[in-house]
Amino acid sequence: MRRALILAAFVLMSFVPVQAFAAWGLGANLGMTLHNPAETGSDNVTLIGFPSQASVFTSLRPGLRVGFAGDSSPHEVYLDVSLDHEASGGDSFTAVRLGGNYQYNFSGTSFRPYLTAGLGVFSEHADFSSSTSATSMTFGGGAGVGFPIGDQAGRLRLEARYDKLQEGKDNGDVVIGEAGITSLLFGFDLWLR
């Protein structure tokens, strides 16, 4: 299943013509996330991350963003990537997320509004008294505004986003609970031309 989800993320990115890309972008997401589990009686969790990361609660807003965009094209694709690993006294927890996204940038001079949508995979592995692993799919979208900086050498972003985390099981036991993730993000990208 993991291979199929990763393949789906790369297929999503194939809708934008490769020859139109003129720049690579490298950036980060900072922000606040509200984790709202679907399970009745579970508490919501609000987290602030600098940069945002994968974890048992944030799960959907990775800190590293690698993108491709055209100079005169409104189309952009990017990968969100994160790894969170914690180890103590022989116990360990690892969360990994990879998400492929498409972004449409509207025209503007001092700022550019945009819409974005994507899908990805979230994987969690824990070694405590017993070992559990699960992988689930994520999908969502958002809207934001980008502010160019340094003669188009970079961009600041402000974005509101909602993602859905699907349930992930290990031998019938729920390891990753279904949840809705609402995020308010501040990010930046540096363009390598």
Image (cartoon, rainbow, N blue to C red):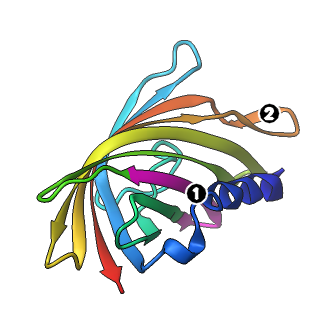
Residue at 58%, 56% in the rendered image: 99
Q: Main secondary structure of the magenta part?
A: strand
Classed neighbour count for the residue bearing mark 1: other residues with Cα under 10 Å, few (<14), some (14–19), many (≥20) = many
Q: Residue at 29% x, 45% y: name it.
A: 144
Q: Which residues are magenta?
A: 84-104
Residue 141 badge: none
Q: Secondary structure at mark 2?
A: strand
Could you tell me residue 87's position as x and y percent?
56, 66
What residue did someone put label 1 on?
A: 100
Above or below — where is 143 with respect to 81? Answer: above
Image coords of residue 58 (percent x, y): 45, 45
Quadrant of res 174 = top right
Q: Position of residue 51 (x, y in %)?
A: 33, 61
Q: Is residue 70 left or right of residue 144?
A: right
Residue at the farthest top position: 40
Mark 1 element type: strand
Would you name the residue on which mark 2 appears?
173
**Residue 158 appears in the figure:** yes
Q: Amino acid at mark 1?
A: Gly
Determine if the magenta segment contains residue 68.
no
> Sequence-wise, which precedes: disc 1 or disc 2?
1
User: 120 or 192, which is in the foreground?
Assistant: 192
